[in-house]
Image: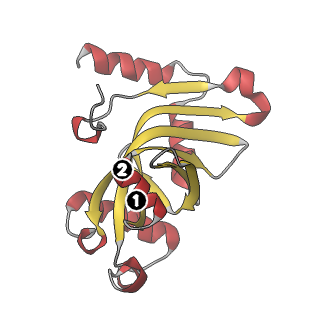
């Protein structure tokens, strides 16, 4: 194991909250708040999205021409927050368009995500067909850069922070 990976794993074990608690909250959250940035200094844009936590990332869908989709096309940096304000998990990350909706069942990785999505929201593949309102949708993956977590009633003693290296493909243009 390389030194950087060993240090990151040690970091996961040295926070007041355990990483397994964070993952459990991400998995069991019914929905997530997604915050994107409107281009041309338009400010933040916050909206709830359905999604799943899988393979270390939050995955969600939205229309590519929606305000969220347009914002992410210009600036993929975003914030994802679980629905709870008492048990807090906030991800500062970078969104990647994984697949247009017509291709979400084509790749092995996205097919695994969609199975979880269908189980979580009790839906069938035919209900998620790329026709109608989903024809413009895309499947997005948020790669975490920094994750914050705490219990609201015990903030000073539970405040936790983890930092992750973004995969090369998820680094915003011009980012180091």
Q: Residue at x 27, y 37 (%)?
A: 173
Q: Is residue 105 above or below residue 17?
A: below
User: Is residue 152 toward the left or the right of residue 143 in the image?
Assistant: right
User: Is residue 105 toward the left or the right of residue 71 in the image?
Assistant: left
Q: Mark 1: which secondary structure?
A: helix
Which residue is the site of mark 1? 70
Based on the displayed image, in which of its 4 quarters is residue 136 positioned?
bottom left
Which residue is the site of mark 2? 74
Q: Give the camera-side residue of 6 and 46.
A: 46
x and y percentages locating residue 46 in the rendered image: 58, 53
Q: Are marks 1 and 2 in contact (CB under 8 Å)?
A: yes
x and y percentages locating residue 20 in the rendered image: 51, 37
Q: Give the camera-side residue of 144 and 64.
A: 64
Q: Residue at x 73, y 27 (%)?
A: 155
Q: Residue at x 40, y 59 (%)?
A: 70
User: Is residue 31 toward the left or the right of residue 150 in the image?
Assistant: left
**Taking the image as drawn, is residue 59 in sight?**
no
Q: Mark 2: which secondary structure?
A: helix
**Taking the image as drawn, is residue 35 in sight?**
yes
User: How is the protein colored in the picture?
Assistant: secondary structure
> What's the mark number on residue 139?
none
x and y percentages locating residue 8 in the rendered image: 38, 21
x and y percentages locating residue 99 in the rendered image: 26, 62
10 Å crowding of disc 1: few (<14), some (14-19), many (20+): some
């Amino acid at each position: 194991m390389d030194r950087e990976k060993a240090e990151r794993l040690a970091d996961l074990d040295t926070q007041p909250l355990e990483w397994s608690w964070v993952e459990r909250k991400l998995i069991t959250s019914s929905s997530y708040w997604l915050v994107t940035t409107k281009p041309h200094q338009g400010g933040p844009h916050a909206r709830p999205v359905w999604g799943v936590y899988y393979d270390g990332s939050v995955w969600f869908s939205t229309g590519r021409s929606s305000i969220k989709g347009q914002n992410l096309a210009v600036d993929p940096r975003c914030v994802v927050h679980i629905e709870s304000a008492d048990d807090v998990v906030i991800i500062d990350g970078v969104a990647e368009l994984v697949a247009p909706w017509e291709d979400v069942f084509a790749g092995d990785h996205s097919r695994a995500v969609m199975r979880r999505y269908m189980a979580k929201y009790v839906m069938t593949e035919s209900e998620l067909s790329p026709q109608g309102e989903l024809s413009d949708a895309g499947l997005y993956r948020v790669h975490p850069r920094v994750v914050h977590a705490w219990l609201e009633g015990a903030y000073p003693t539970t405040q936790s922070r983890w930092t992750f290296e973004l995969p090369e493909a998820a680094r915003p243009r011009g980012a180091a």
